[in-house]
Image (cartoon, grey):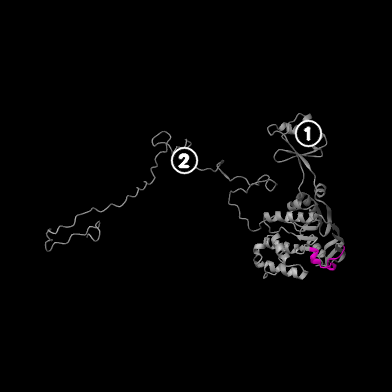
Amino acid sequence: MIEAVGLTKRYGDKTAVYNLSFQVRPGAVTGFLGPNGSGKSTTMRMILGLDNPTSGQVTIGGYPYRKLPNAARQVGALLDAKAVHGGRTARNHLLSLAQLSGIPARRVDEVLGVVGLQDVASRRSNGFSLGMGQRLGIAAALLGDPQVLLFDEPVNGLDPEGILWVRNLMKMLAAEGRTVFVSSHLMSEMALTADHLIVIGRGQLLSDMSVRDFIAANSAGFARVRTPDTEPQQREKLSSALTEAGGHVLPEQDGALRVTGLPMPRISDIAHETDVRLWELSPHQASLEEAYMRMTQGAVDYRSTDDQKAGLMQPLPPGAQPPVPVPGQGQPGWYAPPPPQEGGQAFAMPDPYGGRQAPNPYMAPGAPGATPPNPYAQPAPAAPQPPAQPPQQAPQAASEAPAAPGTPPAAADPTKPEDVR
């Protein structure tokens, strides 16, 4: 178990962590969340004895990290996947760590297989991709088969298969009774992986509870109600009845109603009493991302601003109108509009038949509906003919009189073989 009590860390006049107290219990995956600059990495460094706290203390199994006997066999961590000598191969990197901690060499090959790097074990780490480097860092954390594991952004750079593998690995390690402490900015992944959450902002504790309790405490569920689109008067009728019953009704962009303050059975009863048909009545719960944004919106240090493009905007030509903003743009579920239209009609391929039925190319020529001949088509090339065989001629008779003197010799017949000529 990891336990922090009154943990504080200052760098000059900058307070990175202030009076932070929490426990990370074994048997569960504990997510460590917070905005950039909130002190997550500083806290993990103090847990591992890399930074000394200004005040307070943090222990692992009741001891500070530096006082743990053979700490590498009890605690495994991935804080920076790039903390590897680039000239070493993956196997030699892990082998050096194993030799420092008295871990058998055969364990190196085991963890290389666990993380899927057995085929590149002899490659130097400076040629690894970001995802391969993450896998090598996870292998180093698993090397001593520790009971306590800390991971800082373990899925950074991994492909979907790798993310799924890390998720299942974390759950498996926790199911074995180990303490698993994971920091991440991927809320969707934390919702699938973590059992418990510790959320900090500007170095102070904001929340320490289960994922389900965190979502329920920082969001409001609602019921989505839809009436027939062809009968808007029914929607207005139901909206008034729900408001009179104490509910809060908000219209949505697609015509549905968002109802809070009333349970779903009560909404169904009110619709039945007012004789309103329902096309949809479904519960909706906020996601972990929505709950996290609501919780930490006041603890964000780095906020983006709109790009004004100062000095880069081209002036509009005379008579041109500025672009009209698209309704709903930037809202969840918004998609880009279809391509622009010309003359009020969508762009389409020109119709070569002027609205007539397209001719059938498989009908006999001249038949009604057959494809007319193309006057611009090139004539089809004639099929190649085999070369003509030279005529067989009888040899010149010996009695034939020789040519008269001065008579030019006859031209050689190119169709005759050379020996005949």
Is residue 100 at all visible to an observer of this figure? yes
Q: Quadrant of residue 312?
A: bottom right
Res. 64 image quadrant = bottom right
x then y, percent, for residue 20: 85, 60
Is residue 69 magenta-colored? yes
Q: Residue at x 63, y 56 (%)?
A: 313
The residue tagged 1 is 268
- The residue under the point 67% across, 68% down is 89
In the visual, does 99 lie left or right of 63? left
Residue 396, given in percent of the width and then of the height, sits at: 17, 57
Residue 369 is one of the magenta-drawn residues: no
Instruction: Tell me, yes or no, whether the two marked residues, 2 and 1, touch with CB atoms within 8 Å.
Output: no
Where does the image place residue 18, in percent across and percent down from the top left? 85, 61
Specify the quadrant of the image occupied by residue 177.
bottom right
The reply to whether residue 307 is in sight is no
Depth order, front residue of 350/57: 57
Q: Give the residue at mark 2.
A: 352
Q: Which residues are magenta?
A: 62-75
Looking at the picture, which amino acid does disc 1 mark? Ser
The one of 325 and 338 positioned closer to us in this rendering:
338
Mark whose residue sits in front, 2 or 1 = 1
Considering the numbered disc 1 on the image, is that residue within a helix, a strand or a loop? Answer: helix
Q: Residues within 10 Å of mark 2 (few under 14, many from 20)?
A: few
Cα distance between the residues tagged 2 and 1: 56 Å
